[in-house]
Image (spheres, rainbow, N blue to C red):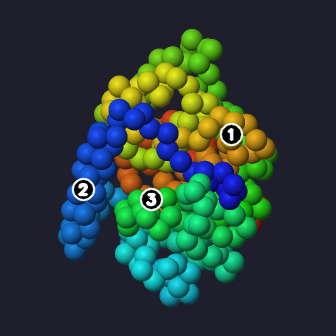
Amino acid sequence: MKNSWKEFQSEIDENLEDSKEKEMSLEDVKQSLLRELNDDEVSYGKELSDEVVEKNELSKELVNKFPEYRENAVKIAFERSPEEYVEFLEKNKEALSVNESKREEGCYYFNNGVFMKKEMDDEEYAEVLRHEISHYLDDKKGWYSEQPEYLKAVYDDTLSFDFNDSSTTEYRDEMLDELFDSDVCYNRHVSDILSAVSGNNPEIILRYNMEGVPYYRHQNSYFDEGHNRENEIYADVMACISENDAETIAFIKKYFPNIYEKTKESMKEGQV
């Protein structure tokens, strides 16, 4: 989340806590197995986006920006990132600082600083870190998410989520069916994208609850301030780009094509 005084939180129905713990445990096992398969390039490669050329290692200068005890979390966060993303991060690393959050709000980005909760395990830390680092990158590009071209991309893709327009119902239902037929539904960044573009529409929240899947979101009151909506969408999509899961990237490309292309475009030189 951008701004220290606001929380980056998930709002999950209390009745789903057991389901959340179960699903996160299954995801942890899945990711652990994938890392064990790292030596088998064929098996590991099947899980990566086709945009990956090779695994990328971060420079020592960048790694030293993170707490030493979080070395494994940093590895998890960026070991699958595409080369273009790693270069983007490396070129903009100078002002970055990563610190422990001392506030109840949780994790957030503020003034070149990423603040992370100490209590998180490495998997969750890595997942949230991608999001907060993306706010930093957005800032380094002059808040790219607030530029007219990006605002238009968000507007164009959001038209498909106008719940007052019956002509979009079939498209939304198709999107939700595809989402919950895959593991993409467990991606907190995708959930937050839907939160932003739909304005936390009750139909989407209900579908998450019915499927027993955690629904991560920001409050509408937060989205309504300034360009917070676009800031969060950018951070969510860039986090997915850095994670580089093939299914997730394919889903975003299909249902948020303009947002995806503009977010990816921000990594190019000269884009401000």
**Residue, disc 1:** 223
Residue 70 found in image quarter: bottom left
Q: Is residue 172 above or below residue 36?
A: above
Point 59% across, 18% down: residue: 163
Point 53% across, 48% down: residue: 9
In the image, what residue type sits under mark 1?
Phe
* Visible residue check, residue 136: yes
In the image, what residue type sits under mark 2?
Lys
**Residue neighbourhood size for the residue with mark 2, other residues' Cα within 10 Å, grouped as few (<14), some (14–19), many (≥20):** few
Q: Could you say which disc has been placed on residue 253 in the image?
A: none
Point 69% across, 78% down: residue: 95
**Residue, disc 3:** 127
Q: Earlier in the sequence, mark 2 or mark 3?
A: 2
Q: How many marks?
A: 3
In the image, what residue type sits under mark 3?
Glu
Q: Residue furthest bottom?
A: 60
User: In this view of the protein, which residue sits in the foreground, 126 or 22?
Assistant: 22
Q: Is residue 59 above or below residue 223?
A: below
Q: Is residue 96 left or right of residue 100?
A: right
Residue 265 found in image quarter: bottom right
Q: Position of residue 85 (x, y in %)?
A: 54, 67
Q: Earlier in the sequence, mark 2 or mark 1?
A: 2
Q: Is residue 134 above or below residue 8?
A: below
Q: Position of residue 128 (x, y in %)?
A: 49, 59
**Residue, disc 2:** 30
Residues at discs 2 and 3 in contact (Cβ within 8 Å): no
Distance of label 3 from label 1 (alpha carbons): 21 Å
